[in-house]
Image (cartoon, rainbow, N blue to C red):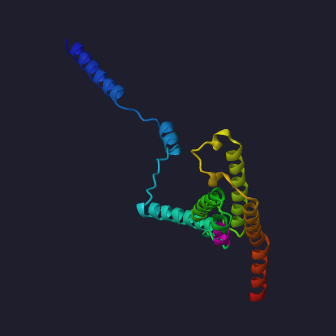
Amino acid sequence: SKLLVNVLAALMVAATRTQSFILRPVRCQCCDYRSSLVQVPSRVTRQVPFSTILSSNKEDSSSRSDDDSKRTSSYVVVDYNDDAFGLVFLCGSFVAQDVVFSTTFLLFSAVVATACKQGKIQFTSQVPAVVAGLSFLVANLLSLILIQNTAATSDNIPGWLLSKSESALQVEIAVCFISILYGFIIYPLLNDKEASEKQ
């Protein structure tokens, strides 16, 4: 019986040792070596200061404004100036007594002057000459349409609006020719002469 008790005690001691050995965590040296070699890089985040962002935005806006100023500096806005305006308008109104021509010339001059002031049309000495020529053509075309139209012979339209003498036509041709001659030939010659004298 003592022998049986000793055997059972030895078996229990052996069982507890084997259980503790099995439950003990075992570390593999090979895995540790591999984990030391392979290192996952952490994500590096760089914080940009807010002042640098503002400075970059200011530099971009300043460069854009400089580009815009360079573009606009090449195009100078000049107001409309017709040296022959008084001659054409007064001769058309009082000498030729042509209301259609005077009204057309005044309307075209106002429209072109507004466009030049807004920068939509670049003013040169030829612009008033073109206005005078177009006014003459459009006014005479309107007069022909009014005369040839059957409704124009009614009593509702005054006779002075339809009647146009040959002398009035000659006056209009003369003043428009002077405006065209001054705008295309005389003024450029005077301008070139002044520029050569300054040099």
- Give coordinates of residue 21: x percent, y percent: 35, 28
Q: Nearer the viewer, residue 150 or 129?
A: 150
Q: Quadrant of residue 109?
A: bottom right
Q: Nearer the viewer, residue 42 or 82?
A: 82
- Give coordinates of residue 68: x percent, y percent: 59, 64
Q: Quadrant of residue 179?
A: bottom right
* Left or right, residue 47 beside residue 159: left
Q: Nearer the viewer, residue 192 or 180?
A: 180
* Left or right, residue 107 beside residue 130: left
| Residue found farthest to the left | 1
The relative height of residue 151 versus residue 90 in the rendered view (above or below) is: above
Query: Can see residue 75?
Result: no
Q: Does 4 appear in magenta?
A: no
- Residue at x 28%, y 18% (from the top left corner): 11
Q: Quadrant of residue 87?
A: bottom right
Q: Nearer the viewer, residue 51 or 94?
A: 94
Quadrant that contains the N terminus: top left
Query: Can see residue 13?
Result: yes
- Residue at x 49%, y 61% (from the top left corner): 57
Which residues lie in the magenta part? 84-90
- Give coordinates of residue 26: x percent, y percent: 40, 33
